Amino acid sequence: MTTSNPVLSVVGVSKSFGDNEVLSDVSFQVGKGETVCVLGPSGSGKSTLLRCINWLERPDVGQIHLNGEPVGVTSGGVVMNDRRLSRIRTRIGMVFQHFALWPHLTVLQNLMEAPVQVQRRPRAEIRDEALGLLAKVGLSDKRDAFPARLSGGQKQRVGIARALAMRPDLLLFDEPTSALDPELVGEVLVVMRDLAREGMTMVIVTHEMAFAREAATRVLFLDRGRVVETGPPDRFFSRPETERARQFLQRYTGETSAGRRSA
Amino acid sequence: MIRDFGIVWTERGLLLNGLANTAILSLVSVVGALLLGFVLTPALMSKKPAVSRAARAFVDGMRCIPFLLFAYIVYYGFPSIGINLDNWGAGLLALTIYNAAYMAEILRGAWAALPRDEIEAGVAFGFSELRLFRRIILPPLVLSAGPVIGNQLIQIIKDSAFLTIIALPELTHAASSIQSRYYVPFAAFITAVALYWGLCLIVEAGVNVLRQLADARR
């Protein structure tokens, strides 16, 4: 799975907040077209790991490479300036737990904002692509609506389309369905499943075990800031190798089969 | 009484000139105060203690001085430290600097209340520095702070009346000179009040437009 040219390579990343070590020597690679689901209990460092990938959070140590290019720190070991870091960030799309759509812009403007303002690609081309993406997530009729007028599921589908409008090499999802009402989770997962099928390279932090099992090409199980187990979802869910993973799965699959997934 | 208003009507040119000057004074200084406020606000929120303390001292100090006294200092006091301004220069400078302190505090409050997520999304999508501020932070900031900024503009319009003491030919000055020439205080001052009220209604209308834009996005 980890080819000689990974899209994302994370090597030895650690991060502490004060005395609290949130990530401890985390390493993994993501190949082109892979869908890696990061699983783990709350507080295991999943979101921090995701935020370190595009340097929204600055790792204390470790290297991150996107398509072989260093992120955050140059190969000479110097921290990049904002402008250089921003240019790299435009190639990493991000979908947020609480959507984080820009409230002053319409849906279509949300999609076009970064490609027009940051990437400076031709406006007409961006607009065509954005309209296509809205059609793809089933929201063509909402293009002139403001985010505040949308349901949670619609907001998150706009969030995904906004990230795709950047033509990213890599897409990061930070618990994209955790803030949604249970009946709205499905519509977002459908979009994500399609992306996985189309070969989009994605790292997804999620608590949706059924989704991870079905859509992931690989699972990364994090506990207390460490990668405890990694492998194909079938093996992870049916024959977890570690006691930690077994306990975690028992708790979660028990909870989900009794709760929201059956609804 | 009607005769008194008749006298004021014959001097309408003087009053309208005063009204125009009041409008110009207020507009120029609200724009200046906002621009200065945008410089002061990041200073107030700076992580460097020296910068944030200096900005805080200026803002708090300015808000504790009566405007009339500050205008006296700028017009009569500044020449002793080598800064000579005519009445227009002194009036504009006093109004602008004085209200910049208020604007900075208004903007700081609105900025701190903006959701962090949306700004962070801007950073994640490659916005930085000035572009991040201009495209992602400023528009929601103006929408949420708009009504309070409008309120401050009304304050500026009223404070500009003090500038009559440095012989600036604004609306209060015009009304005052009409009443002293013809001794029609009630008619002259009531007319000026009505004109101030009209100016404030225009500001209110502007604020309402902003409020509607904000409501559509809320």
Image: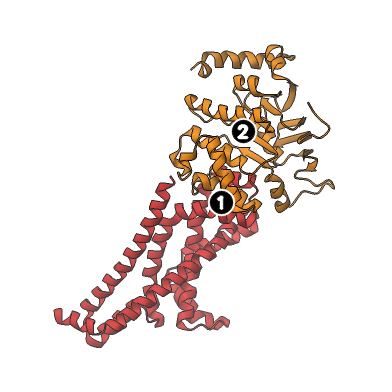
Chain colours: A orange, B red
Using the image as rendered, state which of residue A194 and residue A125 is in the foreground.
A125
Residue at screen point 31% across, 83% down: B14
* Subunit bearing disc 2: A
Place of residue B50 in the rendered image (x, y in percent of width and height, measured from the top left): 64, 59
Using the image as rendered, state which of residue A63 and residue A142 is in the foreground.
A142
* Subunit bearing disc 1: B
Residue at screen point 50% across, 56% down: B107
Residue B1 visible in the shown view: no
Instruction: Look at the image and tell me in which quarter the C terminus of chain B lies.
Output: top left
Quarter residue A166 falls in:
top right
Using the image as rendered, state which of residue A201 and residue A179 is in the foreground.
A201
Disc assigned to residue A174: 2
Using the image as rendered, state which of residue B24 and residue A132 is in the foreground.
A132
Question: Could you say whether the residue bearing mark 1 is in a helix, strand or loop?
Answer: helix
Residue with the most extreme bottom position: B181
Instruction: Look at the image and tell me in which quarter the N terminus of chain B lies.
Output: bottom left
Residue at screen point 29% across, 72% down: B195
Labels in figure, total: 2
Q: Is residue B108 left or right of residue A226?
A: left
Q: Is residue B108 left or right of residue A67?
A: left
Q: Amino acid at mark 1?
A: Ile
Place of residue B166 in the rendered image (x, y in percent of width and height, measured from the top left): 41, 81
Q: Is residue A203 left or right of residue A69?
A: left
Disc assigned to residue B136: 1
Place of residue B111 in the rendered image (x, y in percent of width and height, measured from the top left): 52, 51
Place of residue A96 in the rendered image (x, y in percent of width and height, measured from the top left): 58, 37
Within-10-Å neighbours for mark 1: few <14, some 14–19, many 20+: many
Q: Amino acid at mark 2?
A: Asp
In the picture shown, does residue A123 fall above or below A207?
A: below
